[in-house]
Amino acid sequence: MAQIQYIKHLYEVEEKSLSEIARLTEKNFRTVQKYAYCDDWSQESLPDLEPKSYPVLGNYLFIIDKWLEEDRKVPRKQRHTAQRIFDRLVKEHGFRGSYSSVKKYVRKKKFAMRSQAGGYLPLNHPKGCGQVDFGEFVYYDAAGQEQTGYALTISFPYSNKGYTLAFPAQNQECLLEGMKRIFERIGGVPLHLRFDNMSTAVAQVLDGHDRVLTDGFSRFMMHYRFQAEFCNPASGNEKGNVENKVGYSRRNAFVPVPTITSFEEFNEGHLRQWCEDDAKRLHYIHKVPIQELWEEEQKELLTLPSHPFTVFRYTSVTVNKTGFATIDTNKYGVSPVLAGEIVQAKVFYDHIEFFHDHQKVGDFPRSYKSNDEVCDWTQYISILCRKPGAVEHTRFFRQMPERWQAYLAETTGRERKSALQLLNEIVSDGNAGLCDEALELATENGRTDPDSLRQCYYMISKREYRPTPLKLNTPDLNYHPNLSVYDGLTGGELRA
């Protein structure tokens, strides 16, 4: 304003010409003319903070737009700044304009992108956005018994592509592990995911759309950078696509009732192939293959983080007097040595790891039964060495190798104690898998006493050590000493 006032003063008071004013102020003639002739100085309209056109950037706008659109898929720390865009334009495209023009356009473009991203309606089906839900199904276990399983499905309404994985439960570990595996399978992360108010993700439902999320779900969401949306209570229609997909997969992928002995094998074999085959059918509206639409939609996914998320729940428990730690009503036989001690547990969807003083003390398959007892017979052998008579009465006796069950049942007294000491030695060496082999070898040789068993175990577990001959590369010194002098000392003949 001081410059404008000076121009007006020179023109009105000192009556100088426009050319003189331009020369004195070193301003453009048209600028001087604009302010010298201005009679209305009231400010009724807002100033233009952003330019409406970018003549210098004209040929480069599509390049900047492309870079900024691609940035939505990568972590914020690796997105373009205005300075980086300017540097790349200069270096890669010969841009000769100013940094300020680039900065103004980038700010305006980012604002437009944010406004567009926040403008969805709940029923819209934008690309790269999905819906998540669990569905219940029936299967047969290895014993032919009917069991209940839970299929996690993520569907993408735009293309109608869906991915399904089977789990023994619908707890948080199964939910997050399933989402993680689907993200890795599709090679990216959905921009938005819609859920119902499942307790594994939502700790508390507040007014409106506000939710208090569980700690594990919050960490997972921040790690993979997707936005979570939650339906209104009792409003499953708000994620109707995945509701339909859950029913569709149950009627097709799980009919006839499958026999599942390993969820890993079932997911990677049958379900994986079924999902890919299902994508070959035509979309119910667009009448083109679902896979074709999915390949178009897949380009909108966020990139996977550089480090995968490790899905587990942490807890700490006290070991009881018989060496068991209880998690979700099920008991895990850690070790009687730790009775009364507090152990830390990392609860994964399929197994549980126990630690004491930062040292692993147990690793068990996770049980989804109620009041089940899971134990490892190897943890109790050292205790049995002190109480050999209790072997057949322990709850883990039937878990021991079958040959050893029969062998120990036939032994008594000192022989049984010696056999248990050998078994403890084998387990301590980390060779529990060789127990039956050692006993089988001893039986073939007709000697099954503990000492013979020990020799058989050493034969199959200890590699024979045969050192290679020592090679001397020293030169020949042609040294031939006369040792006959020693013959004289023993009464022999002395030779010169």
Image (tube, rainbow, N blue to C red):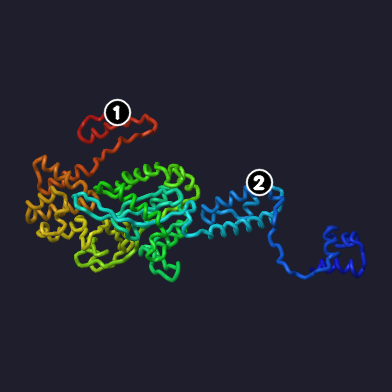
Say whether marks 2 and 1 touch (CB < 8 Å): no
Picture coordinates of residue 268, whole percent (x, y): 33, 46
SS state under label 2:
helix
Q: Is residue 231 visible?
A: yes
Kind of residue at badge 2: Lys
Picture coordinates of residue 244, whole percent (x, y): 37, 53
Q: Quadrant of the N terminus?
A: bottom right
Q: Is 78 situated left or right of 95 in this image?
A: left
Q: Is 376 situated left or right of 181 in this image?
A: left
Q: Is residue 339 above or below residue 472?
A: below
SS state under label 1:
loop
Q: Is 117 situated left or right of 392 in this image?
A: right
Q: Is 408 situated left or right of 111 in this image?
A: left
The residue tagged 2 is 91
Kind of residue at badge 1: Ala
Write down the quadrant of residue 218 in the picture: bottom left
Picture coordinates of residue 351, whole percent (x, y): 29, 56
The image's mark for residue 496 is 1
- Residue placed most toward the observer, 399 or 46: 46
The local crowd at label 2, few if under 14, some if 14 to 19, many if 20 or more residues have their Cα within 10 Å, is few
- Residue placed most toward the observer, 495 or 364: 364
Which of the two labelled residues, at mark 2 and mark 1, occupies the earlier sequence position?
2
- Residue found at x 46% / y 42%: 292
- Residue found at x 19% / y 58%: 380
- Residue found at x 73% / y 69%: 44
The local crowd at label 1, few if under 14, some if 14 to 19, many if 20 or more residues have their Cα within 10 Å, is few
